[in-house]
């Protein structure tokens, strides 16, 4: 199967992570990449973005932000693939209102 979202760690001291993103993007351009970084400054966010990473976030916020970011990245993957994001399985019901 083809991954829709890939999560990679980067310290930006070596080319490993960025070259991995770049090489996979040439093979599977729709794959969304989330790069985890120790620091999250503008200077450190730019290199992953230039090399094809779709998102980057500091490791310290991983527990809070990763679940919602995975959903967003998967929806971006589906949009790039020409598909639709899956509809919610729960039906929304509007509770009846009482007249005044």
Image: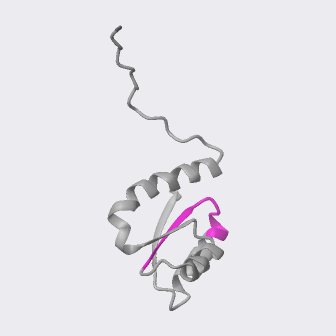
Q: Position of residue 80 (x, y in %)?
A: 64, 52
Q: Residue furthest front?
A: 100
Identify whether 54 is placed above or below 59. Answer: above
Identify whether 9 is placed above or below 29. Answer: below
As for residue 80 lying within the magenta part, the answer is: no
The segment highlighted magenta reads: 25-37
Identify whether 48 is placed above or below 94. Answer: below
- In the rendered view, how is the structure colored? one colour
Question: How many labels were placed on the picture?
Answer: 0
* Along the viewing direction, whichever of 75 and 16 lies nearer the viewer: 75
Q: Residue at x 58, y 83 (%)?
A: 43
* Residue 41 can be seen in this image: yes
* Residue 23 can be seen in this image: no
Q: Position of residue 97 (x, y in %)?
A: 35, 14
Q: Residue furthest top?
A: 99
Splitting the image into 4 quarters, where does residue 95 fall?
top left
- Residue 73 is left or right of residue 22, and the answer is left
* Along the viewing direction, whichever of 26 and 17 lies nearer the viewer: 17
Q: Residue at x 62, y 71 (%)?
A: 52
As for residue 32 lying within the magenta part, the answer is: yes
Which quadrant holds the C terminus?
A: top left
Q: Position of residue 58 (x, y in %)?
A: 42, 73
Identify whether 83 is placed above or below 11. Answer: above
């Amino acid at each position: 199967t083809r991954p829709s979202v890939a999560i990679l760690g980067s310290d930006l001291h070596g080319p490993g992570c960025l070259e991995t993103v770049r090489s996979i993007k040439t093979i599977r351009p729709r794959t969304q990449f989330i790069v985890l970084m120790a620091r999250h400054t503008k200077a450190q966010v730019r290199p992953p973005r230039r090399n094809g990473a779709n998102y980057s976030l500091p490791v310290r916020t991983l527990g809070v932000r990763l679940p919602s970011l995975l959903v967003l990245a998967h929806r971006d993957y589906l949009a790039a693939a020409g598909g639709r994001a899956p509809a919610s399985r729960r039906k929304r019901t509007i509770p009846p209102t009482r007249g005044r």
